[in-house]
Amino acid sequence: DSGVTQTPKHLITATGQRVTLRCSPRSGDLSVYWYQQSLDQGLQFLIQYYNGEERAKGNILERFSAQQFPDLHSELNLSSLELGDSALYFCASSSWAASTQYFGPGTRLTVL
Amino acid sequence: EDQVTQSPEALRLQEGESSSLNCSYTVSGLRGLFWYRQDPGKGPEFLFTLYSAGEEKEKERLKATLTKKESFLHITAPKPEDSATYLCAVVGNNNDMRFGAGTRLTVKP
């Protein structure tokens, strides 16, 4: 158990809908990262937050947004969902920018 | 731009047959190289962090080594439970973690 929690574990929704994925980092970690992993694809970095501030952006679509709250948990919002958004979404946390990232169990999103 | 290339893409071994996985990287100012293990449908599990050329770390049947251009993950006498995808990642001066595509390891009994 990495100490990073993600909810929900599974999410099934329809095209055009909006969903929110939640992540709680390990105790004491200030950085939160979001990744997308499609079937048989590598991990694609989406976005990073550090202590509430957006720090880095990767291949994140404009339909996606995220935020980190004062208690350090983070939410990833996905809107106007398309079939291609079906994937595993992972959250990771670390204590500082370049330190080891610890991953949560992921949320499996299925868009029908 | 930082790049990470892992080889081979897939590796099939017999139980007890030792081998190595390769991770070649180009990065501006290496701040850390990371190895993870990922089982299907699960989150990556941290294995090792290496910070400088010449460094080595071991854990059970796994040993990671680092040079200025690549890292190796050596697997000694693997067991079927070692079957997984092994991911390599680097962090450079920009503090962004870049992952390779992974090596899918299958160990047959």
Image (tube, rainbow, N blue to C red):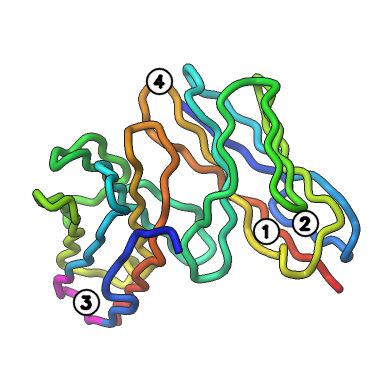
Whole-percent x, y for residue A14 in the image: 22, 81
Tag 2–tag 4 contact (CB < 8 Å): no
Residues marked 2 and 4, same chain: yes
Please, what is the three-letter code of the amino acid marked with disc 4?
Asn
> Residue B104, which numbered label?
1
Of labels 4 and 1, the one closer to you: 4
Q: CA distance from mark 3 to mark 2?
A: 37 Å
Q: Which residue is mark 3?
A: A15
Residues marked 2 and 1, same chain: yes
Highlighted range, magenta = A13-19
Tag 1–tag 3 contact (CB < 8 Å): no
Residues marked 3 and 2, same chain: no
Tag 4–tag 1 contact (CB < 8 Å): no
* Dot 3: element: loop
Q: Is residue B37 left or right of residue A52?
A: right
Residues marked 3 and 4, same chain: no
Q: Which residue is mark 2?
A: B11
Q: Residue at x 56, y 60 (%)?
A: B38
Q: Which residue is mark 4?
A: B93
Label 1 Cα crowd, 10 Å radius (few <14 / some 14-19 / many 20+): many
The subunit letter for the residue under badge 1 reads: B
Residues marked 1 and 3, same chain: no
